[in-house]
Structures are given as structure tokens and as C-alpha cells.
Image: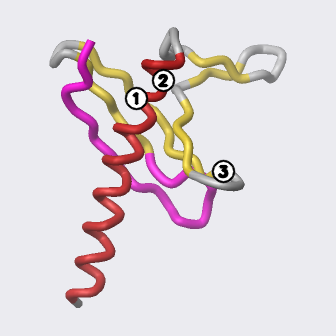
Amino acid sequence: MEITDIRIKKVSNDSKMKAVASVTFDNSFAVHDVKVIEGPDKLFVAMPSRRTPDGEYRDIAHPINSDMRGILESKVLAAYDAIEEESDFSADAE
């Protein structure tokens, strides 16, 4: 399975959630609401989730193994870094 597209939408810098991504696999399956979160030491990726009746959150789509999770996280964070660099570059140009 190959990640064929990642679209990042930045959100307010006032929260720990920095962006929301949509990830397309094999040009045929998309997962929306993948979140880029600022953790205590680094950014990480949180999968889309839903709140259960008992108040807990459960992922509704997620990688099955750690290899795929690592690939997904590295590609989403690279896409986020790319748009961060673009916004830094455009701010410097003004």
C-alpha cells in the first residue's frame, strides 16, 4: 500500500492541534481528520477518532502495525513541515 497524496490544512497556532490532514492511499482510499499534534517533546500524528458513550476516544481508522504507523507519521509530518517552511518563506518575503 502506498500513500499517494497528503493534504494539510493548518489550524490556529493557539492550540496543541497544529493541522488536520487527509491521506490518500493507492489513489483510491482516503482517510480524513488525521491530526498533527504538538506533544511535550515533538509533533506527532493522531488518527481520526470518535468519542464513546463512556467518554473515551477510540480510533476509527488506524495502521495495524508499527511499520505502517511510522511511514504514515513520517510522511504526514514531512508534509506539515513543508507547508510550515512555505509560510515562513512567504512571511520573510513580505
Q: Residue at x 56, y 33 (%)?
A: 46
Secondary structure of the residue carrying tag 3 is loop
The quadrant where residue 6 appears: top left
Quadrant position of the C terminus in the picture? bottom left
* Cα separation between marks 1 and 3: 17 Å
Q: Which residues are magenta?
A: 1-19
Q: Residue at x 25, y 67 (%)?
A: 86
**What residue is pinned by disc 2?**
69
Q: Residue at x 26, y 24 (%)?
A: 3
- Give yes or no for residue 13 being in the magenta stretch: yes
Residue density around tag 3, few if under 14, some if 14–19, many if 20 or more, within 10 Å: few
Q: Secondary structure at mark 2?
A: helix
- Identity of the amino acid at label 2? Arg
Q: Position of residue 37 (x, y in %)?
A: 57, 47
- Which mark identifies residue 35? none
Kindly identify which residue carries mark 3.
39
Q: Nearer the viewer, residue 51 or 73?
A: 73
Q: Which residue is mark 1?
A: 72
Query: Does residue 23 sit above or below 1 in this rendering?
Result: below
28 part of magenta stretch: no
Image spot of residue 75 (x, y percent) = 34, 37
